[in-house]
């Protein structure tokens, strides 16, 4: 196991009817800005619960954060915050709203000339407006981590940043608010959390047993409970297991002291920025390709994944177990109704050229060994046509 240090300061408030507890978490006399998306919180009752809990505060609201949040929209919110002297933010939504809020919190305090530098140059963040989260979609883990992904629509760049200053002060996770999710978003959430674990697990063995066993527990939970959430959407325990699994998939814990990959995400972000595919759709396309092209480098962990999560055992040859495990991952995405090939989304070879040239321009090589060049990305995507 590699050396590591670990802290996660986010207070989690989990369970039924917990949104009202946010009153106790926000300092009295705060001027609070509620930030939310396209309006799902108005139709499922979450908006009413939040505003009722904020009765004793002076509060404002800003709606219209897009899925895959735009830098341009975030900067409008920053201006609104400055005009109204807002000093506390409350993200109410899924990963996009939470990510946008993180960026807004940092950009509002940014001392440099251009806040886009936070994303494009990893400019140093020295402060951020404090914020809390009411999560409505379990997927990204953003509610308990210090990262965010923002898209500049003008240039089709989807980039990530992270800073200890953008950990939420608290996150409220009420599984009941996820009942109103459309099936496509339920599936997306399951796949996203699954791939977050894979990015931190499917590299090479370091005998990090706690991290591995924990990762396998999250993956197993997602593969068992995921299809149930689609079949019986109002099962509380299923939703609770998925919500908690998604949070733990990316709160830093399983990444302690182990190598991390993230190639699937980085390639996927280019597909979303260029073609507007959902984040999880891109992951379901790319991951089986990464596993196929990198199967020798990742062989030991693919075998472990097959055995521990998909029940693929020693009665087969090593090669068969690897192939069957890659197929099992692809089948899992298809089982939760996410298509796994570029052509399923109307994309062809031209899209591969565009993704590779974007990555070439960024000068990135990807993966746990930094050996996935744009040429290898071409091979990965070509086997997903
Ligand atoms: O905008 P509204 O009306 O709220 O509708 C949203 C949106 O259309 C809807 N929704 C959310 N909660 C709902 C609901 N509809 C009904 N009932 C509810 N309870 O769902 C749609 C998608 O929401 P979004 O927030 O975009 O989804 P998700 O949580 O999957 O977030 C995706 C974003 O997170 C980023 C992705 O790149 C993408 O931009 N990620 C962030 C990460 C992080 N910060 O650590 C890691 C991830 O890898 C990911 O990259
Ligand atoms: Zn993701």
Image (cartoon, rainbow, N blue to C red):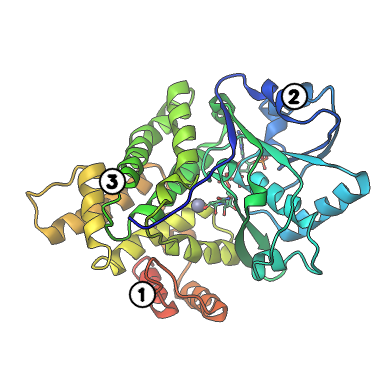
Q: Secondary structure at mark 2?
A: helix
- Residue 69, compared with residue 236, is above or below; it is below
The dot on residue 379 is 1
- Residue for point 61% across, 41% down: 94
Q: Secondary structure at mark 3?
A: helix
Q: Quadrant of the C terminus?
A: bottom left
- Residue for point 62% across, 60% down: 161
Q: Residue furthest left?
A: 315
Q: Which residue is mark 3?
A: 209
Q: Is residue 320 visible?
A: yes
Q: Position of residue 78 (x, y in %)?
A: 82, 53
Q: Nearer the viewer, residue 213 or 47?
A: 213
- Residue for point 22% across, 51% down: 304
Q: Counting other residues with Cα less than 10 Å from the Cα at mark 3, is it few (<14), some (14-19), or many (20 or more)?
A: few
Q: Secondary structure at mark 1?
A: helix
Q: Nearer the viewer, residue 152 or 7?
A: 7
Q: Counting other residues with Cα less than 10 Å from the Cα at mark 2, is it few (<14), some (14-19), or many (20 or more)?
A: few
Tag 1 near tag 2, CB within 8 Å: no
Q: Residue furthest top?
A: 17
Q: Nearer the viewer, mark 3 or mark 1?
A: 3
The dot on residue 48 is 2
Q: Position of residue 12 (x, y in %)?
A: 57, 31
Res. 152 image quadrant: bottom right
C-alpha distance separating marks 3 and 1:
32 Å
Ligand 2 within 8 angstroms of badge 3 C-beta: no
């Amino acid at each position: 196991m590699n050396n590591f240090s670990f802290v996660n300061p986010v207070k989690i408030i989990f369970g039924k009817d917990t949104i009202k507890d946010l009153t106790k978490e926000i300092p009295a006399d705060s001027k609070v800005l509620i930030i939310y998306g396209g309006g799902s919180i108005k139709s499922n009752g979450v908006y009413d619960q939040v505003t009722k809990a904020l009765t004793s505060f002076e509060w404002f609201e800003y709606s219209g954060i897009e899925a895959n949040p735009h830098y341009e929209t975030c900067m409008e919110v920053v201006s609104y915050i400055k005009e109204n002297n807002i000093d506390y933010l409350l993200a109410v939504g899924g990963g996009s709203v939470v990510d946008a809020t993180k960026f807004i919190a940092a950009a509002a305090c940014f001392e440099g000339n251009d806040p886009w530098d936070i994303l494009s140059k990893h400019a140093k963040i020295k402060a951020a407006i404090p914020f809390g989260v009411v999560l409505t979609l379990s997927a990204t883990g953003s509610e308990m981590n210090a990262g965010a992904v923002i898209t500049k629509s003008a240039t089709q760049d989807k980039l990530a940043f992270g800073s200890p200053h953008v950990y939420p002060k608290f996150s409220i996770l009420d599984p009941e608010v996820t009942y109103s999710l459309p099936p496509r978003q339920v599936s997306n959430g399951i796949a996203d959390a699954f791939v977050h674990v894979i990015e931190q697990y499917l590299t090479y063995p370091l005998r990090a047993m706690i991290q591995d066993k924990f990762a396998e527990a999250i993956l197993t939970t997602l593969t068992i409970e995921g299809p149930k959430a689609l079949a019986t959407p109002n099962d509380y325990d299923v939703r609770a297991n998925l919500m908690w699994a998604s949070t733990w998939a990316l709160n830093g814990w399983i990444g302690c002291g182990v190598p991390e990959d993230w190639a699937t995400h980085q390639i996927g972000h280019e597909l979303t920025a260029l073609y507007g595919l959902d984040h999880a759709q891109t992951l379901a396309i790319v991951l089986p390709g990464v596993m196929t092209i990198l199967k020798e480098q990742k062989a030991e962990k693919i075998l472990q994944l097959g055995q521990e999560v998909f029940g693929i055992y020693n009665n087969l040859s090593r090669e068969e177990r690897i192939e069957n495990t890659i197929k099992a991952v692809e089948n899992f995405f298809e089982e939760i109704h996410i298509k796994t090939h570029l052509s399923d989304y109307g994309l062809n070879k031209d899209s591969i050229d565009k993704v590779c040239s974007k990555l070439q321009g960024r000068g990135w090589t990807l993966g746990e060994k930094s050996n996935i060049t744009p040429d290898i990305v071409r091979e990965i995507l070509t086997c997903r046509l």
